[in-house]
Amino acid sequence: MQPTTTQPLLEVSDLSMRFGGILALNSASLNVLPGSITAIIGPNGAGKTTLFNCITGFYRATSGAIRFNSGNSSVDLIQVLGGPFKATDLTDPRAFSTRLYYKMLGGSHRVALAGVARTFQNIRLFDEMTAIENLLVAQHTGLDRNVVGGFLRTGSYLKSEHTAVDRAFYWLDKMGLGEDANRLAGELPYGHQRRLEIARAMCTQPKMICLDEPAAGLNPNETKALSEMIQMLRREHDVAVLLIEHDMGMVMDISDHIVVLDHGEVIAAGTPQHVENDPAVLAAYLGADYETGVAL
Amino acid sequence: MSHTEQYNFSKTALRGLRDAAFAGVIALIVFGPMNGLILDGYGLDFHLDRPFLMAGIVALGRFLLTLSGCLPAVRQLRERLMDFSHRGVTVEQPGDSQVRWKVLILLTIITGLCAPFLVSKYWLTILILALIYVLLGLGLNIVVGFAGLLDLGFVAFYAVGAYVIALGAQYWGLGFWTAIPVAAVLAALAGCILAFPVLRMHGDYLAIVTLGFGEIIRLVLNNWLDFTGGPNGVRAPSPTLFGLEFTRKAKEGGIPFHEYFGLEYSSFYKYLLIYLVLFVIVVALTLFVHRLRNMPMGRAWEALRENEIACRSLGINHVTVKLSAFMMGAMTAGIGGVFFASYQGFVNPTSFTFFESALILAIVVLGGMGSIVGVIIAAFVFTLVPEMLREFADYRVLVFGVVMVLMMIWRPRGLLQIRRKAFKRPRPVYTRPGEAQPLHAASAGQSL
């Protein structure tokens, strides 16, 4: 890896995740630079989604560290989930109070608040709400949530709602869903649902967006359009993109950096060209025999 | 054209005859032993004319029913009734006129305000009860309909509200008017206490825990003899109007309401006051809940119902959202409890059994989970119809069950469709990334 002057946006170091006797992740490390497109690839069961869930706060990693550096603040993405108390907390009141705070108010939503948005492999939209309401829910934390103010329709409430609706329309248009604004999310065609999920994630105004197999189930034309959309996100909105994808053509096309996982370990990382020719990667994908030179 | 119709008609008539014969035979088999054989001491009397008459009526009815299918109007009606593909949710169109709704709401409010002067005292008390159930339905609708948290112990908060006014009056001299906010706050607190341990639970587990909570409250009220009076209950104070009491004789130094205004004594005035205050609160709360739906809090509740994991991925703290739903629902029930206690003049734990929780849940489910108008209609149906059919009181629970089964087949999503608000494209105010100014900012004049 070439040395970089910019500080990575996301630093994952020595991350391990154990489910009972299964080590799903074995000291995996990776960095995501601001404004870059990073892809995680690997055979089925390699631990890609586990890594994703650890980063986005849906799993608490067994060991290791995840730091998210946006702007001038740095957030420990594992601490915000709220962990169990440790013996050392008793001697350190500050550590104790932080832990207590995150225990009470922490959780995976904190990761989103830090600036990490995500989509899901199996689409998770609010099916019985309209497309635009999906996007308004995404802006929840930034809105005027005063119940009394909302009931009386105060100026600040109306202004906050107005901006939210406008931003939602902006993202619908960006994703080519302008016509679907007032349709139920669950009734949209599959491709639109995928795009709506990305729009919803973007409405949280993230610094980094994690896409879990965004091209799954899309036809080649839709995949091409999606690639362009992802590049547009990076170009116009200055977000870093972290994606899991099985469509190699798309991955090689758009990624700046590729991390290859196999059996929970990072077996290669680098530019698409570098990864493409890495013998370890070929072995993981095509079988170990390839390494020893036996013709398949 | 007319030839085909004639053919269709004769075909339908033939089919009708066949159906009628079949139905008649079935009716004969059913009614034969029921109506035809009459016990007379140790013997049996045969009255075969009666089952034949019944079978004849059934057959004729069946024939007419099939024949009526020829009329387009009947066919249309039948198709509408038999439409099982009923969708639970529709979205309004941005241009949809709201005038119809506004007129309807205004008419309802005027009717509601005039109603107590047109009905007898007995029916006024029934109306009060109906409004209390509307409150309870609105409250549970927040928890079950919006937030999707199945709460089988909702009556607990109702009990909290009722006992706050009764015990508050007994121990701390709490009056009717102060009891309303105090009960709202305390019931919300009870909701908070219940919600904390159950936040991690979903579906069935949540239902069981809330069921337990409801029973705990009732048992505490029943067994804490020194404080709550146990099964003997507690007296609850009546409301006062600016210090004027509604009793026949006021407490020392006071003047009762009827003497002050020079009226004949009647407990009607007390119920009238309760009704009017309750009506205003119900209207205000309905408006509040309606607006909540389109506010960030209400949207977060519905989003939580739809998909909790997605909510968390968007930075919404599901714990506080659930907590707010529980507290808001409990608060509404607490207010309902105050009115119930004051209207009855007395509370004891038998008013807060599981059956009550089930009834409120039935109101919410029947009204259409998440539909405010549906819940209001269902609350009235469930309180007024049993009163109108007093003679059939024995069959009340049976009818209740039949109605529930029919509803689940015919309209599983509730009486009314849920309507979602449509959004119009607003004047741009959001600064687009990569553009110096909002789109069309120049044409839109100044931005906010």
Image (spheres, grey):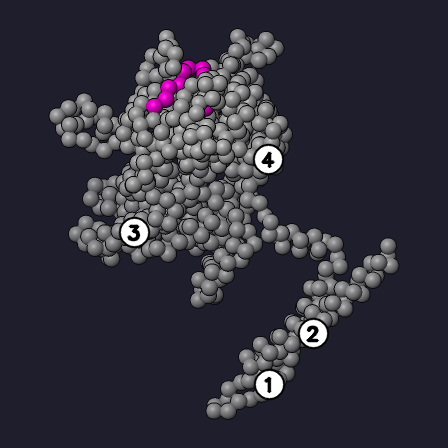
In the displayed structure, would residue B274 be above or below residue A40?
A: below
Residue underneath mark 1: B47
Query: Which residue is disc 4 drawn over?
Result: A189
Asked whether the residues under the numbered discs 4 and 2 touch, taking CB atoms below 8 Å apart as contact, a structural biologist would say no
Question: Which of B362/A63 is in front?
Answer: A63
- Of all chains, the one bearing label 2 is B
Residue type for callout 4: Pro
Determine the main secondary structure of the stretch shown in magenta.
Answer: strand
- Would you identify the image quadrant in which residue A106 lies? top left
For mark 1, give the secondary structure: loop
Per the image, label 4 sits on a secondary structure element best described as loop
Report the side of A293 relative to A176 (left or right). Answer: left
Instruction: Give the residue type at disc 2.
Output: Ala
Q: Is residue A40 magenta?
A: yes
Bounds of the magenta segment: A29-43
Is disc 1 in contact with disc 2, using a CB cutoff of under 8 Å? no
